[in-house]
Amino acid sequence: MKRVIGLISLAALGVTIAYAQGASAPANPGQTSDLAQYPGFGHNPDADIRAHAADEAKRQQSILQCMKAAGFDYHPEVSAVVRADAPAATRSKRPPSKNATYAASLTGDRLTQYNMTLYGIPDPNSETNLWDPSSPTGGGCWGEALRATSGVFAASTALASDYVAMRREANEDPEVKTAEAQWSSCMREAGHNFESIGEFNGVVSNNGEARGREKVSPEALGPMKTQSDQCLETAKFVDVQRGARTRAENRFVVRHKATLNAKRHRP
Amino acid sequence: MSKSPRSLLVAKYITPLIAFGIASAAIPGTATTYVPKTNNGYGNGYRVFLSPASHSPDRPSCLTADPLATENEMAWMNSATATNGYDPNSLDLTERGWTVQIGSGTNQEKVIQANTWGTHIFVSVHSNGILGGCTTTQAKAGTWGMYRTSDTNSKNLADWFHYWVSPASPGTNDKSCLISTCSNSTTLLEMETSKAPTRAYLEQEFHDYQAGATWMINNITWQWRIAASIDGHYGNPR
């Protein structure tokens, strides 16, 4: 049975969500990343998911009150989480929504009034007029709820581009490049010509196909992967990459301390 | 490429289909988050938001007798299959280490979901149509990866969609193109309002082209190509 967890139950039960500060993902075991103290950056994804669920529940309650006060029905709806050990997705209709059903029952001015109250815009499916959730004004009941509860991912949303740049910076770290070159050399000696580990990952993940390369036969992929694991070990690539990532994250924290602190999650 | 008849699909997956139907009905949800299947559930640290079409009213395809063969439903199904698919011969997004959220609700709600989740890649998943009915021909149909003006990240991902998804789709007018040249809009505000560093738009195929609609609803062996595109855009991080 698929493990789909309805997260509203957390809020319904009054569970307090505490973010386990400093609990790091396996990406950096034994090393200290200054980014680990900030929720929403993947050092404790389970805590992030729980905190996000609690944020959503708060917002939904706020929207419920706001819509009720304006004379509209509203049904709090929250995210579901599908765990890593869940069986594969199946092909069925998308999950139903009571709010969508209710909105579909409204017509004319009443529908426009509903949309203006809930979203602050007349048509929430417009491709030319949507409300910007980061706006300090507007957004109807949603806007009020978001301004009251910015959420665990507020900082990581604001810094998403900088985060990606930091990850790329870590990949370009001289120590990482040296280790990757050692891996590449080790692979070449075994008859496999790859410049980068990313390129290799692509070949393995795409059944031997890769952009700009001749297809590798499926039978060759297993032994190639075994060889790569040995070469990664020889080059100590994983440790080197972890170190570079931690240093890059520490620099990221220095660069963005003001934003990180200003948008830090306060449950 | 090989095709999977719908009857085979239903027979093979009837049990999980029922299971998912029950789960879905019990938990409406505004969105669904999928945890990676690698690195003990931690994955590669990046978050992908798939935003399936939410037209109101929904747009029918050639296959009018099939309630699942509409633009909204096919966009949702293929987003789910790309995320957590069941083709044992290929890797979906979660198997590659991506954390994925599939948005639901209106365009406005999906933008809110994406912007409160620290999204790194935002992909609108749709299907194309010209005149409705079954009027589009193979020569006009195909997969389109669409990108924003002056956005190299957006163009790069659209190019990856063109590279991986286009060869599998039955139409031959595949392309990677600017939104303003491939659609009636100069911009698509769902993508403009998202804050993700990379945003692109995938028109899987044409739903008013018979073979295109059939491919989107009956074939379960190509959605890994969406995963391969996103993976390729970021250099296959693990």
Image: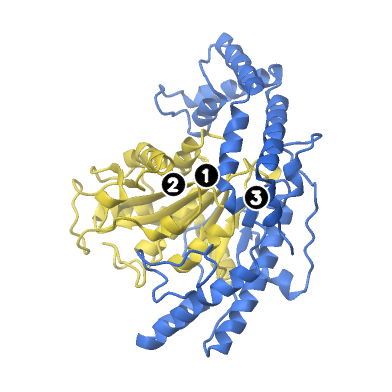
Secondary structure state at the residue bearing disc 1: loop
Question: Which residue in the structure is indicated by mark 2?
Answer: B223
Q: Which chain carries label 3?
A: A
Looking at the image, residue B195 sits to the left or right of residue B208; the answer is: right
Q: Residue B92's mark?
A: 1
Looking at the image, residue B188 sits to the left or right of residue B112; the answer is: left
Which x, y percent locates residue B215? 33, 51
Indicate the amino acid at tag 2. Answer: Gln
Chain letter for yellow?
Answer: B
Which x, y percent locates residue B19? 58, 64
Indicate the amino acid at tag 3. Answer: Ala
Indicate the amino acid at tag 1. Answer: Asp
The 10 Å Cα crowd at callout 3, few under 14, some 14 to 19, many 20 or more, is many
Q: Mark 2 lies on which chain?
A: B
- Chain A: colour as depicted: blue
Please state which of residues A263 and A79 is positioned toward the viewer in this rendering: A263
At 63% from the left edge and 72% from the top edge, which residue is drawn? A59
The 10 Å Cα crowd at callout 2, few under 14, some 14 to 19, many 20 or more, is many
Question: Which residue in the structure is indicated by mark 3?
Answer: A84
Furthest residue toward bottom: A71
Q: Is residue B206 above or below residue A70?
A: above
Q: In which quarter of the image is residue A179?
A: top right
